[in-house]
Structures are given as C-alpha cells and as structure tokens.
Image (cartoon, rainbow, N blue to C red):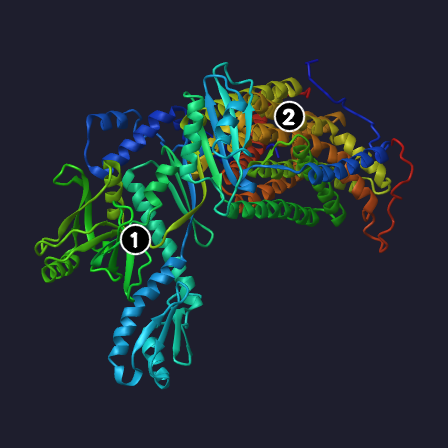
C-alpha cells in the first residue's frame, strides 16, 4: 500500500500540476477573457485593430486560456424560458393547403361541384362540396397532398388525417406529422434565435431546447430580459400582400382568402388584404437600417432573384394599385405602386425609432420565427449584484479554507498540513475541471465548493482516525499507516457513491442554478477522492521515505 | 509530545442507547411537529414554486417599507410582499428590499408594461433606486417545478436506498432511509417555522443534506459491518455502541470542518445564499444526530442476520435487551 511505483508518482504529480496550470487563467479572469474575445473577433473579421492586438497580447497565446463560465447570477444578464407555440404551424399549413386544394378541385368542377371552406377551429381545414356523391373523388384529391411522414417514430404514416362525413371533408395534420412538425419547428426556432442573438454579438449565450417545445435562452451581459424579449420575442414575419381596400370596421365580413389587418401607424385604420402574400420575407437576402427621404429611420432590403422576379411581375401588372407591407400581422405601410419595381430592392418606412429599425433589420436578416414564443420564465440579474456575489463567494471560500486548514493542522499536526495542501489543491482542481468542461459556476455552486472544502477532508479524517486506532493497537508506524489506508477505503468509496447519487439526481432533474450546483458538487467529489487518496498518500510516502520515522504522534 | 487538538478522547465508552427512548421520542416528536408546522403555517414558497414576480431593489438611501407599499398600492398591488433585507456585509449606504408580487391571472407573471409602471412608481419614491434583479416565473412552470423538486428528493432517496441495500443488508437501507426522511422533514419544518423562503435552491440544499447525512450513516454502517464480522458473539446493541464510539472522533471532526466551512459562508457569503447555507448547516447537525440516534436504532429494531451458517435468521440479540455500557 505504501509502495507507489515511479510512473504512478509521476502520473499523480503530473495530473496535479496540469490541473493547477489549467486553473491559472482564472486568476487573471478579465485579461484572459479579453484575450479570448480578441482572438475570436480577429478570427471572424480578419481585421486587426490596435485595441484588439493589445487585448490579444495581454495574455500569451501558449498559456492555457480556458476560463470557468460564470453563471448569470454571478455575471448579470437575462434568462428567458420560452414555449414555442407549435400549433401556429398547423394553422399555417392548413391555410396554405386550402388554395391548392381549391384549385385542384375546381379542375374537376363537373363532378365535384362548388367547394367552400367552412369555419373550423384553428389547424383544421373543413371543406364542403356541392355533390355529396363525389366525395370519394374529392377525398382522393386531398389525399394527393398527403405525404408519408419522414421521421423515425412516424415512419409509414401519412402526413394528413382526412375524414369524410356526408358532403364535408375534415383535414388536419396526423399525430405523427404533428410530432415531426413540432420537432422541426422547435429546431428552426432555436436556429433563428441563435442567429438573432449572435447578430447582436453578445458573449457566450446559452440557447438550448428544454423538454418538448421549450427553449431556454441565457444571455450574459445584456441589460434586461425585456431587451432580450424585444429581440427574440417577435416572429418578424414579413410579407408583401395585395390590398383590396382600407376599412374602419375591424369586423367587416370578407371573402375567403382575405383578411383584415390593422395599420401600425394609425389606430382605427384597417386594411383588407389577400391572405396569400405576393412575396414573403423568406425571399429576402439582406436588410439593413437606413433613413428614408425625410431623414426618418427605415430599413432597406433586397430580394433574392426569385423574389425579385415575382415582385417585379406583380408591380408591373398592378401599377396604380396599393400594396401592403405586412409585419407580424400589422400593416407597416400601404404605398401605391407608381411604377414597376424590378430592381429587387426596397425600403420599409413607417413610424419607428432608430433602435427599432436596427432590430427589425437584424430580425429580417436572421429570418422569421416559425411560430411565436410564450415566455414562461424571465429573470434579469444586474451586473452589480453578480459582482457582489463573486466578492462574497471568494471571501467566504478563502475564510472557510483557512479555518478548515487551521483546524486540521491543530488536530493532526504534520498530517493535517498534508490534508490541508490536498484541500487547497482540490479547490483549484475543481475550478480547472469546470473550465475544461465548460461548466458554469453559479452562486449555489460557490456554496458547493465551500461545502466540498468541509467534506473533502472527510476522506482524510477517516484515514487518519483509522491510523490513530492502528497506532493505539501498538502497530509500527508504517504498518499502521498502510492498514489505515486499506481499512478506510470501503467507507470512503461508499460515502462518495451515495453523495454522487444525490448529485446525479440534481443534475438530471434540476435546472439553472441547481444544475450548476450539481456539476460543481460532482466535480468536487471526483477531485476530492483523487486528492485525499492519491495525493495525500504520496505526500505521506515521501515523508516516510525521507524521515524513516520510528514513531508517529497523530 | 506534540500538541493535538482532540475534541473527543481516544477511547470512549458512551452508551448511546441509554436514552434511546428519549432521543427516539424526540426525533419522532420533531418529525410530527415539522409536518404540523408545514400544514398549519405553510411554507413561504419563492416564485419558483408559486409563480409571480420578485424584484430586488438596492438604494444608497434608507427607505421605509411603507413608502414602497404606498407606491405599489396606488398601482393596485396592495398584496405585494415587501421586505427589507438586512445583512452585516451591507455598508451604511446599501439598503436592499425584496418585493414579491403574486400571480393574479392566468398569464402569471407581471407584464412588461406593469413592470415599467412599478419601476417608475418606485423611482418616484426613491430616485436613486436600482433594480438589482427582476425575476418572473409563470404558474405553468412553477407547478412543474414543484413536481420536479418532489421527484428529485424522492429519486435521490430511492437511489441511495438501493445502493445501501446492494452494499449492506436491507435493514441498513431501511435505517438509512428513515434517517433521511427524518432529516428532510426536520429541514422543511425549520423553513416553515421561520418562514424562510423555500425555492429551487432550497431543494438543492436539501439534496446535499441528504448526501451528507447518508455519507455519515454509511461510514458508521461500514464500521458496524466490519465489527459484525469481527465479533461474532457480541450482542448487536453492544456492537452498535462500540461502532459509534470508534467512529465518534471522525463524526465530530467532519461535522466540525463542514460546520466551519458553512459558517464562513453564512457570515461572509452575503444574503443571496443565506437561506441556502442555513438549510445545509441545519442539515449537517440533523444528519449527524440522525445517524447516531435514528438510523442505528432502526437497524437494531429490525435486527441483522448474524450467523450465516444457520438457517434461522432470528438468532440476533433481543432488540431491547439490557441497555448497558459494554
């Protein structure tokens, strides 16, 4: 037990030194952070400004540069938990299916007769045809729009669920298709939110899926959750629709395929527009903030070739008619077409501030969200509060460590010094591990480290107490130490496994700060077993080899 | 001879079962009292579990809670809870308040417009006020969080029980789990008694307490198992006492080091984690107590199979035979 091979010694010391080196950047947190940011910016933009170079050279390139991520509660920032309204996609799918079915059925007008859409709950398309006898043909037409579902779980199923009753047909997405659509919608939303947040250029945002249809967004350094919500909370669905006419009555009856949308600028003014857009925001290639001819904020945009062609054709056919620029179901403006616009670019102007124009441009560039988000949870933590927490956390960690060291040394003398060195190294190893894993340190996490300082000595205490007992039984020093380590092992293992179970449960069921705490605790368990068993033992072995002690007072 | 600080003498002969009826009765009474406290006084749930909005304000000038309340009452938030936070680490120019606004409607949290109104109203009372943190949780999430928290504590307990069952005997598993339930109940009871904020981090503290308490229990059980093999003829109660005396020094050492570390956090860690640390500190105390006075007693009552050569497992010491020192 007290013979440690040379290679094992090298391994233990090597691992410890590596851990210490990896933790070193955290001592120079700000400088390393600026270095990392500068390197990233230079890599992305390829431009090297004097400030960037100064920031980059503030920390040598060859040194480790991984830092512990600070959680929102330590750094300040915004946290949002949003639920994607996946049902909106069902509705959109049905609404776009209707004109296609209508067209297909009008081709067989002699057999089917007239067809019309009946009012139905959102996400359901209800049709009524004139000749009840032609229902099989009509169903056949609808079925033509159904595809096999392409997903692992829904394989072999059709995308549309079609029901016929008398002369009515009810169409909706099948359950398998709904599941597949939900997944797609959430992934798409994730991607677009990521793009929008990245465009604003904040550091290390966390954007991830939670559960079925939820998205967790954490952005450090942003002023408030409101600001973040402004950026990602709107779908930014842009479209260009033909206008039937203006109205003052929002409840006016309109024919199928048309809808009434409010004007953004003028309360009480509404426009009747065709639901099917001429061109939609997906066909934009670029958008940027600009000013209109009156010097007011506006957004310039450019279409892709197919969008430009469609828009050109439409405007040349409808000179003198108004068309509506619709953003998130509000008419931003409804200008009259003076001449054909074939250049493929245009401008959105309306009542907006410069910040709004800027945000809209970001949103248009990043693309529209497939569905709206409902926010279930929002938190803003100010940066000062975070700094206070860091200060309080570091102070209490230092005091806790000092007090534990004092107590250990008073209780066990030299062996207490060994245990203390292990405990201090343990704290540093926790930090370096967290840095390497990209784990996030939260305030409860700091409390977890402090707790680990207390419990990490436990393994050493178990061993030392055991050695004391063996010594009392009259065993020789080396023998007592060796037996002490051996006998204590099973208790140490059992004790740490049970703690690990609790930490694992926290990790899998917890969220936010609790998860961070669980990670810290787990890492602390692993490192404390390493330092208490391997490192302390190595120190004791060195001491024995050096002093060849005849007696030991413990 | 070098000086060694020893809180516990080298060899002790405490009889931990002399007062077993008193201690066990106390534990049982404390558990019942905790349940009653929770039922009668209820827990002071944080927004994590109840939904709503909590705002932390900081201001360099002193304020009156009643002024804040007045400002909020004009906005019809008369039921908001406003508490001033005191902390030894705050200087004279730091005055902190926690404002909690419950959920009124289905959407749960306060809307952005309402939030702006609230902030504006408070700014009128105190122009230097800062909003250090603003958190909202909707009722949909909060009810899920309650369930998740419950599952977490239950899953951790079951997991620990399964592990101890595998490593020891089922009697030990039962003993450890009863001790765990004891610790959880007493900690929750403490939160009910002092109406401390009970939220997600409290659950984390509770789970850590579980880990610590079972850690303690396992070390004692491990020694107990060893002694069971070593002293085949010794009555169970004597083995238990011997084990406890042998491990007493370690139990005290670890409790003290953990206590020292947590006390440092309690004093210097700031008010944000105070409740969290209190829960853990209390958990350490209760965890140590329950190992000695709850877990062991249960194992003693259930009896442990002693002689593996015989078929009859009833060959154990009578549970309540003479409680004398070995």
Residue A179 at x, y percent in the picture: 43, 62
At x 55%, y 48%, the residue is B144
Q: Which of A403 and B64 is in front in this view?
A: B64
The answer to whether residue A2 shows anywhere in this view is: yes
Decide: is A543 above or below A150: above
Relative placement, left or right, of A391 versus B87 is: left
The answer to whether residue B303 shows anywhere in this view is: no
Q: Which of A256 and A520 is in front in this view?
A: A256
What chain letter is assigned to the residue under label 2? Answer: B
Residue A83 at x, y percent in the picture: 43, 50
At x 89%, y 35%, the residue is B323
Q: Which mark is residue B259?
A: 2
What chain letter is assigned to the residue under label 1? Answer: A
Q: Are marks 1 and 2 in contact (CB under 8 Å)?
A: no
Disc 2, SS: helix
Q: Residue A329 carries which label?
A: 1
């Amino acid at each position: 037990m007290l013979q440690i091979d040379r290679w094992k010694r090298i391994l233990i010391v090597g691992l410890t030194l590596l851990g210490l080196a990896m933790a070193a950047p955290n001592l120079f947190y700000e400088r390393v952070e600026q270095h990392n940011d500068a390197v990233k910016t230079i890599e992305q933009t390829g431009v090297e400004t004097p400030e960037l170079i100064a920031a980059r050279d503030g920390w040598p390139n060859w040194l480790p540069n991984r830092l512990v991520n600070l959680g929102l509660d330590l750094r300040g920032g915004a946290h949002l938990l949003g639920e994607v309204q996946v049902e909106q996609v069902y509705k959109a799918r049905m609404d776009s299916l209707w004109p296609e079915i209508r067209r297909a059925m009008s081709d067989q007008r002699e057999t089917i007769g007239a067809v019309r859409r009946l009012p139905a709950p959102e996400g359901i398309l209800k049709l009524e045809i004139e000749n009840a006898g032609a229902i099989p043909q009509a169903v056949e037409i609808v079925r033509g729009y159904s595809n096999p579902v392409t997903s692992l779980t829904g394989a072999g199923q059709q995308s549309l669920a079609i029901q016929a009753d008398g002369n009515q047909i009810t169409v909706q997405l099948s359950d398998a298709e709904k599941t597949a659509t939900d997944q797609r919608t959430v992934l798409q939303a994730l991607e677009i939110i990521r793009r929008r947040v990245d465009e604003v250029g904040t550091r290390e945002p966390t954007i991830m899926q939670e559960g079925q249809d939820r998205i967790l967004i954490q952005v450090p350094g942003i002023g408030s959750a409101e600001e973040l919500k402004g950026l990602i909370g709107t779908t930014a669905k842009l479209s260009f629709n033909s206008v039937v006419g203006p109205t003052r009555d929002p409840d006016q009856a309109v024919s199928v395929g048309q809808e009434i949308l409010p004007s953004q600028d003028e309360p009480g003014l509404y426009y009747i527009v065709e639901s099917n857009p001429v061109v939609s925001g997906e066909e934009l290639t670029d958008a940027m903030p600009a000013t209109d001819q009156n010097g007011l904020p506006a957004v310039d945009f450019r279409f892709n070739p197919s969008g430009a062609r469609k828009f050109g054709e439409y405007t040349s056919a409808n000179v003198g008619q108004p068309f509506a620029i619709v953003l998130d179901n509000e008419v931003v403006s409804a200008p009259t077409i003076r001449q054909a616009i074939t250049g493929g670019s245009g401008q959105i102007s309306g009542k907006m501030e410069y910040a709004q124009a800027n945000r809209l441009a970001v949103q248009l560039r990043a693309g529209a969200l497939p569905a709206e988000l409902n926010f279930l949870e929002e938190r803003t933590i100010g940066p000062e509060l975070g700094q206070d927490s860091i200060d309080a956390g570091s102070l209490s960690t230092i005091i806790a460590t000092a007090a534990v060291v004092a107590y250990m040394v008073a209780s066990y003398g030299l062996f207490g010094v060994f245990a203390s060195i292990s405990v201090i190294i343990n704290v540093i190893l926790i930090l370096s591990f967290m840095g390497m894993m990209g784990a996030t340190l939260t305030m409860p996490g700091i409390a977890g480290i402090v707790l680990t300082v207390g419990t990490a000595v436990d393994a050493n205490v178990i061993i030392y107490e055991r050695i004391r007992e063996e010594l009392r039984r009259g065993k020789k020093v080396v023998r007592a130490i060796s037996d002490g380590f051996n006998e204590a092992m099973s208790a140490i293992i059992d004790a740490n496994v049970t703690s690990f179970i609790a930490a694992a449960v926290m990790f899998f069921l917890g969220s936010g700060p609790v998860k961070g705490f669980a990670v810290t605790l787990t890492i602390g368990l692993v490192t404390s077993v390493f330092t208490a068993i391997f490192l302390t033992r190595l120190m004791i072995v060195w001491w024995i080899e050096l002093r060849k002690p005849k007696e030991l007072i413990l | 001879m070098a000086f060694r600080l020893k809180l516990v003498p080298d060899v002790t002969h405490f009889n931990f079962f002399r007062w077993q009826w008193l201690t066990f009765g106390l534990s049982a009474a404390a558990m019942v009292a905790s349940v009653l406290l929770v039922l009668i006084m209820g827990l002071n749930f944080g927004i994590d579990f109840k939904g709503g909005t909590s705002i932390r304000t900081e201001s360099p000038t002193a304020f009156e809670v009643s002024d804040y309340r007045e400002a909020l009452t004009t906005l019809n938030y008369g039921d908001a809870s406003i508490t001033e936070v005191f902390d030894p680490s705050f200087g004279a120019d730091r005055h902190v308040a926690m404002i909690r606004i419950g959920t009124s409607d289905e959407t749960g949290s306060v809307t952005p417009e309402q939030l702006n109104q609230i902030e504006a109203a408070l700014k009128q009372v105190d122009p230097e006020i800062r909003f250090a943190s603003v958190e909202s949780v909707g009722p949909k999430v909060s009810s899920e969080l309650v369930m998740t928290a419950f599952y977490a504590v239950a899953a951790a307990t079951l997991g620990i029980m399964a592990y101890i069952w595998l490593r020891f005997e089922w009697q030990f598993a039962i003993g450890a789990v009863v001790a765990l339930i004891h610790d959880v109940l007493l900690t929750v009871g403490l939160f009910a008694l002092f109406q401390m904020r009970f939220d997600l981090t409290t659950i984390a503290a509770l789970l850590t307490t579980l880990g610590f308490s079972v850690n303690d229990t396992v070390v004692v059980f491990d020694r107990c198992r060893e002694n069971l093999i070593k002293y085949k003829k010794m009555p169970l109660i004597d083995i238990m006492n011997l084990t406890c005396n042998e491990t007493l020094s370690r139990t005290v050492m670890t409790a003290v080091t953990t206590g020292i570390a947590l006390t440092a956090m309690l004093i210097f860690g700031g008010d944000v984690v105070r409740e969290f640390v209190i829960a853990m500190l209390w958990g350490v105390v209760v965890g140590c107590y329950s190992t000695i006075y709850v877990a062991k007693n249960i194992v003693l009552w259930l009896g442990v199979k002693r002689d593996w050569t015989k078929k009859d497992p009833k060959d154990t010491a009578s549970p309540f035979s003479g409680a004398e020192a070995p």
